[in-house]
Image: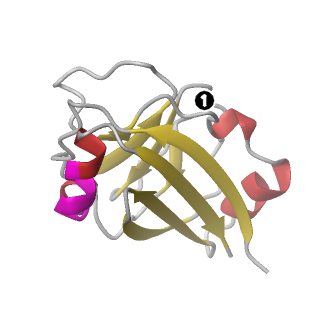
Amino acid sequence: MPLEEVIHARGHENVRAEHASTFEVTTDDYLTPAGDCILAIEADRAPADFDPAFVAACQDPEATITFTIEADGHAETVVGRGDPDLEFTNERSAVGRTSSYVDDRTIMVDAAFAAVGFDRDLVAALADGAEATVTLTVE
């Protein structure tokens, strides 16, 4: 049975989702135009808040991690994998990566695509400030 973590956040007028190698959800309450990987802000939870069992499951290099974001009737899912070096200790940001790079913000590596690959109708809804629900699962 997959383990799950849910984050509630919202979009922002500066959501552009143009980054080619990462995507991010942050607890910050602002977003500058430079933050082109950020999908949503004001997240109610960060990786440091996740259940230890979820974190341990994500540290399996064979783990499949799924990130789904829903806003205003639109949804997108991206799949990546776990890594033994995933820490889930960051208290601000959750970052998915298309590479194998890991830091304390990383929630998955080898993601199928980054911010630029997200559905443009979803991105438009987030840019209009829509409420967003992020569901992370690991199996």
Q: Position of residue 19 (x, y in %)?
A: 19, 46
Identify the residue at horizontal 54%, vertical 26% (top origin): 92
Q: Which image quadrant for residue 118?
A: bottom left
For label 1, the residue is 90
27 part of magenta stretch? no
Q: Is residue 32 toward the left or the right of residue 85 in the image?
A: left
Q: Position of residue 116 (x, y in %)?
A: 18, 55
Asked if residue 85 is positioned above or below residue 118 in the image, the reply reads: above
Q: Residue at x 67, y 60 (%)?
A: 58
The relative height of residue 109 versus residue 11 in the rendered view (above or below) is: below
Residue range in magenta is 117-124
Q: How many marks?
A: 1
In percent of the image, x 62 and y 76: which residue is there? Answer: 62
Residue 34 in sight here = yes
Determine the main secondary structure of the stretch shown in magenta: helix
Apparent side of residue 17 relative to residue 86 in the rendered image (left or right): left
Please tell me whether residue 69 is drawn above or below residue 37 in the rendered image.
below
Asked whether residue 85 appears in the rendered view, the answer is no
**Image coordinates for residue 98, horizontal then vertical, percent:** 33, 59
Q: Quadrant of the N terminus?
A: bottom right
Residue 16's image quarter? top left
Furthest-bottom residue in this view:
1
From the viewer's perspective, is 108 left or right of 91? left
Q: Is residue 121 magenta?
A: yes
Q: Position of residue 41 (x, y in %)?
A: 42, 32
Q: Determine the residue positioned at 63% across, 72% down.
A: 63
The residue nearer to you, when weighing 102 against 90, is 90
The foreground one among 112 and 39 is 39
Q: Callout 1 environment at 10 Å: few (<14), some (14 to 19), or many (20+)? A: some
